[in-house]
Amino acid sequence: MELWRLTVHEAHELLKRREISSLELAKAVLERIGAVESKVKAFLTVTEEVALKMAEEADKRFAKGDTVTPLTGIPVAIKDNMCTKGIRTTCASKILHNFVPPYDATVVAKLKEAGAVFVGKTNMDEFAMGSSNEFSGFYPTRNPWDLERVPGGSSGGSAVAVVTGECLAAVGSDTGGSIRQPAAFCGIVGMKPTYGRVSRYGLIAFASSLDQIGPLTRDVTDCALMLNVIAGHDPMDSTSIPQPVPDHTQALVADVKGMRVGLPKEYFGDGIDPQVAESVRQAAEQLAKAGAELVEVSLPTTDYALAAYYIVAPAEASSNLARYDGVQYGYRAAVADDIVAMYSKTRKEGFGHEVKHRIMLGTYTLSAGYYEAYYLRATKVRTLVRRDFERAFKRCDVLLTPTSPVPPFKLGERTDDPLLMKMSDICTIPVNMAGLPGISVPCGFLDGLPVGLQFIGKVLDEATLLRVAFTYERLSGYRNLLAPL
Ligand code: GLN
């Protein structure tokens, strides 16, 4: 048996029964990385030694009868914008090419405590700004279903690692769709939890009021298991929610009888590929046959969410990225006449084009005289977007939409068209603007390329998302898809 084909829960059963060891599992995954990585480039750093050592530790836990968790001995990958003590963390940026964090992000610490095995740090768009992984400061990741196409972004490396068997599960971050869109493009499950459900401590900040960490997995059960480990209040993140975390595996019930599933009409019209819309509609029909009640709803401000996001996110980014000046850590320009020249050369050489673009945009919209016209107005639009959802949730329990308006596109196809690139996130961005949880699950293939659908839930109601996603997974049979490589 090729062990990298196992899901987290399948591997856990075998580990528990001592039919396989964590070391065997880690070696199988590392070998798989050796076999496919040159084709897909999902990683920026592969941590072979760390993985073997952590796997041995996990085996000791099993051998001694110590407490184990469903993640003990499971090979996972971590997006390269989460701080890992002693392991290089670049955010896919030249400006952090040599940065080795002195501490672990809370999510990383939680995974360690659970006994997970770290196989590496995954590629991404630089500072998580992008939708295709083509804006990585190092090299693009490729979609394993068609190597000429993008895997989505910005957590494209994490999604690809999961669907190729280069890990069993991964974590990513989602500011406007960066977990869900690559999950859809790669044929896996990706969840952005409620804003504040998972600690952002040690996540390299892009847009702090939108950023959220979440799991990328091969089925819904694994998503619940990962969420159980990473969620929870953290005093180190003042925006994390001080609420207990339920056991999300309790939500894995294949039953949607009486559940009201809302279909927002704005997500099935203009700008959405008709075949994608059709796949999602068919999924809705399947849920209806299983007893769900379909309700048409309207989210009228959807059209403005994207524009408002591209004010709010760059504004926060311009402020967050001010810290990269070549002084304390990271890249520093070799020669400069004085300190101001050093700052400016460092930033000119260290940041890529897209990141500079956003810093300039953000600085502009926050500057005196423009703040009210742009930033303040965008935050008001944000309130309207949130109210739209609140109104819709009076009539339904969960919303169903496409995840991405289009199937995976070709490398280079959108890099010269910023608007088209940004349109990749029209279905996911409103969810971040409102702070709601969303999950993408595979719902079929178009010309051999995966298509995903998105469920959107109420604040802190990840349970309903998992339940409907789990039911749909049973109905569709789309789980543990592995790309043919
Ligand atoms: N693609 C969006 C952007 O470029 C969202 C990215 C993300 O979620 N990190 O901002």
Image: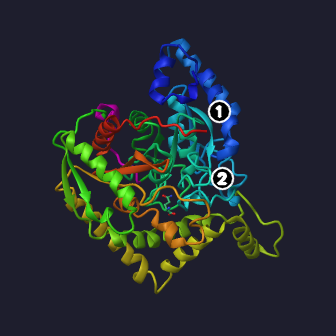
The earlier-in-sequence mark between 2 and 1 is 1
- Residue 185, percent from left and from top: 49, 51
In the shown orientation, is residue 122 left or right of residue 49?
left
What's the magenta region? 239-251
Amino acid type at circle 1 is Arg
Task: Kindly identify the residue that appears in the image at 61 percent across and 39 percent down.
Answer: 485
Between circles 2 and 1, the one closer to the viewer is 1
- Residue 107, percent from left and from top: 50, 42
In the shown orientation, is residue 2 left or right of residue 452?
right
Is the C-beta separation of discs 2 and 1 under 8 Å? Answer: no
**Residue 460 appears in the figure:** no
Does residue 67 lie above or below 461 as drawn?
A: above
Question: Relative to the observer, which residue lies in front, 141 or 318?
Answer: 141
Q: Quadrant of the N terminus?
A: top right
Instruction: Judge whether residue 130 is colored magenta.
Output: no
The CA span between labels 2 and 1 is 24 Å
| Disc marking residue 246 | none
Does residue 140 lie above or below 336 as drawn?
A: above
Task: Kindly identify the residue that appears in the image at 39 percent across and 56 percent down.
Answer: 276
Residue of label 1: 32
